[in-house]
Amino acid sequence: MIVMINGAFGSGKTSAATKLQPLIPNSMIYDPEEIGYMLRNVIVDDVKMEAEKTDDFQDMELWKVLTVKVAREIRQKYNKHLIVPMTIYKSEQFNYIHQGLKELDTDLVHFTLMTSMETLHERLLKRGDEPGGWTFKQAVKCVKAFRGVRFEEYIQTDDKTTDDVVNFIISNVLSNRK
């Protein structure tokens, strides 16, 4: 099984994944941001293709390719269910990764954590992000994109605790497996 937890920065993906992981036996968290950090350090600007010279490693072709390949390798080597928290709002990247993970395991579920801009800003400030910084700018793009495209199962998180979100996810995962 693979559980994708999508949403804007500050929507609660990582918190939900961390609480969800102990509830799914034989599971682990796989965060594709780590691949992005590695690529950012390895592929310097003078090597990048012109379209990749942005402030977002998801614009690097290798990021989406390696996200799927690394998931495949982890599954083959360790045979674990994957919990994948990630902000992925760009349709091309989402479709590629979603399809690749679906080919890896047909038992794939995807949730998008939705929240108001006000709540996102409060959460970003609470975790120490700078107003006007990168995550704040991305929040605007994410909120707009998630409303404009169907990203499967939505969970409105403004008035929900992390435990509420996890309980919703686990009940849906369990009902899908019956």
Image: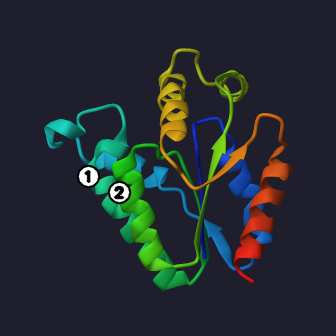
Neighbours of disc 2 within 10 Å: few (<14), some (14-19), many (20+): many
Tag of residue 33? none
The answer to which image quadrant residue 52 occupies is top left
The answer to which image quadrant residue 119 occupies is top right
Q: Is residue 162 above or below residue 126?
A: below
From the viewer's side, name the closer residue of 40 and 96: 96
Residue at 15% over, 43% down:
47
From the viewer's side, name the closer residue of 100 and 152: 152
In the image, taking residue 59 as reference, residue 159 lies left or right, namely: right
Amino acid on which the number 1 mark rests in the picture:
Glu
Q: Tell whether label 1 touches label 2 (CB within 8 Å).
A: yes
Mark 2 highlights which residue?
A: 64
Q: Mark 1 falls on what kind of element? A: helix
The location of residue 92, given as percent across then percent down, is 34, 51
The location of residue 131, given as percent across then percent down, is 58, 15
Residue at 52% over, 45% down:
87
Please say whether residue 38 is visible from this viewpoint.
no
Q: Is residue 106 above or below residue 129?
A: below
Please say whether residue 96 is visible from this viewpoint.
yes
From the viewer's side, name the closer residue of 159 and 51: 159
Amino acid on which the number 2 mark rests in the picture:
Lys
Q: Mark 2 falls on what kind of element? A: helix
Q: Is residue 91 above or below residue 132?
A: below
Q: How many marks?
A: 2
Quarter of the image that includes the N terminus: bottom right
Neighbours of disc 1 within 10 Å: few (<14), some (14-19), many (20+): some
Tag of residue 61? 1
- Rounded to the nearest angstrom, the CA distance separating label 2 from label 1 is 6 Å
Residue at 83% over, 59% down:
167
Residue at 74% over, 78% down:
25
In the image, taking residue 60 as reference, residue 171 lies left or right, namely: right
In the image, taking residue 128 as reference, residue 69 lies left or right, namely: left
